[in-house]
Amino acid sequence: MKSWKFSLLTLIAVGAILLFGFTFRNTRTPKKKAVPFVPPKGCVFRTVMGEESSELNSAYKTPEKVQVSVDRGLSWIATAQNKNGGWGAGSHAHQDVRDPLAVEADPATTAMVSMALLRSGTTLSKGEYSVRLRRALNYLLQAAENSSSDSYNITQQTGTQIQTKLGANIDVILTAQFLSNVLDYADHDPGLKQRIQKNLNTCVAKIQRAHDGNGNIVGAGWAGVLQSSFAANALESAQTKGADVNEEALDRFRVAQKNNYDVKTGDVKTDMGAGVMLYSVSGSARASAKEARRVEEEVSKAKRDGRLAQSAPASAENLQKIGFNKDDAMKYSTAYEVYNSAKDAAQREDVMDGFGSNGGEEFLSYLQTGESMVIGKDTDWKKWYDNISGRMLNIQNNDGSWNGHHCITSPVFCTATSLLILSINNDIEKLTDIGNR
């Protein structure tokens, strides 16, 4: 009996010790595994926009309703892809055909949709629409590879909505822009990356060959100023990727765009812009953004160092004082004035009304203005983003698409451009990198 009691007490004691040890071990703070940070969906304009404003140094999250709008647009446009991997806007002669699967694919529209997918978070290897993006890339690469070496464009199609309104060679321009953007996502496939780079150079050569000598692209359409402006953008992006860009040709494009706006008088040349001020001033702002940013940074540094008074303007005289040669001082001070005046003009309500209603050209102009502000690290970006996102959400169709009400009416092209506007945040690093170079 005594032995039985002893054994029972022993078991109880051992059990208590084990229970205590288990409890003690599990009440200690567990060591957490390191988990890579994944930014929340819709995170915009991180900390690259400036140093002085504390607001700009904190993350700004895209409003939920904007993200919902983007998701609906992506869902709609994914279903509009043709069997050959491309997307189409349709012909100018048959703008009444709105069914995206009832029109022929074209490189300009395909490039625009592909950039929208890329900017919205899809890559060649990840994302809900990665398969569609790979098919679109192959479509565009084949178009470039099958084009004649002495042609200006990468397609033999004529009379598309986009060509008629923007210019006959807009396809190669937008394709070059997309190829520059997608290069960074081809590291997993060296052969594909080499193919993209080769075709980017093919497109760049065609764009530069199509230069008319006055800073414009031959074959201008109804709003040809936008074709030439996007040509400058494409060359600028291609240059950051090591493409064979002729710096003098790029500078001529920039000068032509800047010359469309007279800072002193406020006059705007609209002969290449269908008489619409918005198309010209948005291009002027975009073409001068990079140079304006350099002026802002150099002048700010000179003021911090005591080389310029705090109230000193960014004049040509003051730029010479801080190290610019005479010609550059005049060039950069002019660009600074053009940028600040043109981007303000492009955001005026009367100017944003464009042709009087929403068309693809208006959407493209809004995109130009927004990108110029990011490249220029402009602290007014949030005001622009809040205004334009509200405007775009108000005109989105119930099915998630957007369409124009004049000229470029294509729901595919207009939806792609709208998505590029609303998700501009995802290209912050790329756009600011353009401003760095």
Image: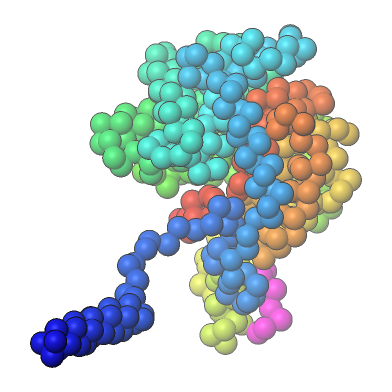
Q: Residue at x 51, y 72 (%)?
A: 323
| Viewer-side residue, 54 vs 393 | 393
In this view of the protein, can residue 286 be seen by the observer?
A: no
Q: Position of residue 280 (x, y in %)?
A: 74, 40
Q: Position of residue 163 (x, y in %)?
A: 64, 20
Query: Quarter holding the C terminus?
Result: bottom left
The answer to whether 131 appears left or right of 293 in the picture is left
The answer to whether 26 appears left or right of 101 in the picture is left
Residue 292, above or below 274: below
Q: Residue at x 38, y 41 (%)?
A: 185
Tell me which secondary structure the magenta stretch mostly adopts: loop
In this view of the protein, can residue 181 be seen by the observer?
A: yes
**Magenta stretch, residue numbers:** 309-315
State the image quarter where residue 368 is shown.
top right
| Viewer-side residue, 144 vs 302 | 144
Residue 1, above or below 254: below
Query: Quarter holding the N terminus?
Result: bottom left
| Colour mode of the rendering | rainbow
Q: Residue at x 69, y 78 (%)?
A: 312
Residue 311, above or below 384: below
Q: Residue at x 70, y 73 (%)?
A: 313
State the image quarter where residue 301 is shown.
bottom right
